[in-house]
Image (spheres, grey):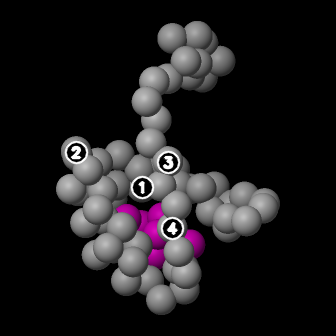
Amino acid sequence: MSKKIASLPNVEEMHEVMGDDSYLLKVRVENIEKLSDMLKNDIGTITEVASTKTVMVLKTLKKNGIPC
């Protein structure tokens, strides 16, 4: 499953995490509609994916150790 997800073109980063979730993805899409399409038509078609949770960044305060 991880190889299928990692191969998706909009997935910029993929991290295996501890806790309630198995993976944390950083994806970049043009708009909400493209995100919805990706969740339904790409990630949603992978049978091993039981659920997803989406969090959106409103503002970046620090990146690569440098305040923005």
In the rendered structure, does residue 5 fall within the stretch colored magenta?
yes
Task: Kindly indicate whether the residue at mark 4 contacts the one at mark 3 (C-beta within 8 angstroms).
Answer: no
The x and y percentages for residue 47 are 48, 89
Which label's residue is closer to the chain start, 4 or 1? Answer: 1
**C-alpha separation, residue under disc 4 versus residue under disc 1:** 14 Å
- The residue positioned 51% from the left and 67% from the top of the image is 52
Which mark is in front, 4 or 1?
4
Query: Is residue 5 at all visible to an observer of this figure?
Result: yes
Location of residue 65 (image quadrant): top right
Query: For residue 30, which numbered disc appears in the image?
Result: 2
Q: Nearer the viewer, residue 39 or 26?
A: 39
The vertical placement of 43 against 59, above or below, is below
Q: Which residue is mark 3?
A: 55
Q: Which residue is most to the right?
A: 18
Q: From the image, which quarter does the N terminus lie in?
A: bottom right
Query: For residue 11, which numbered disc appears in the image?
Result: 1
**C-alpha separation, residue under disc 1 versus residue under disc 3:** 14 Å
Which label's residue is closer to the chain start, 2 or 4? Answer: 2
Magenta region: which residues? Answer: 2-8
The x and y percentages for residue 37 are 25, 66
Which label's residue is closer to the chain start, 3 or 2? Answer: 2
In the rendered structure, does residue 63 fall within the stretch colored magenta?
no
Give the structural element (helix, strand or loop) at label 2.
loop
The amino acid sitting under disc 2 is Glu
Q: Which residue is mark 4?
A: 52
Q: Identify the main secondary structure in magenta.
A: helix
The x and y percentages for residue 24 are 59, 56
Give the structural element (helix, strand or loop) at label 4.
loop
Which label's residue is closer to the chain start, 1 or 2? Answer: 1
The amino acid sitting under disc 1 is Val
- The residue positioned 78% from the left and 61% from the top of the image is 19
The amino acid sitting under disc 4 is Thr
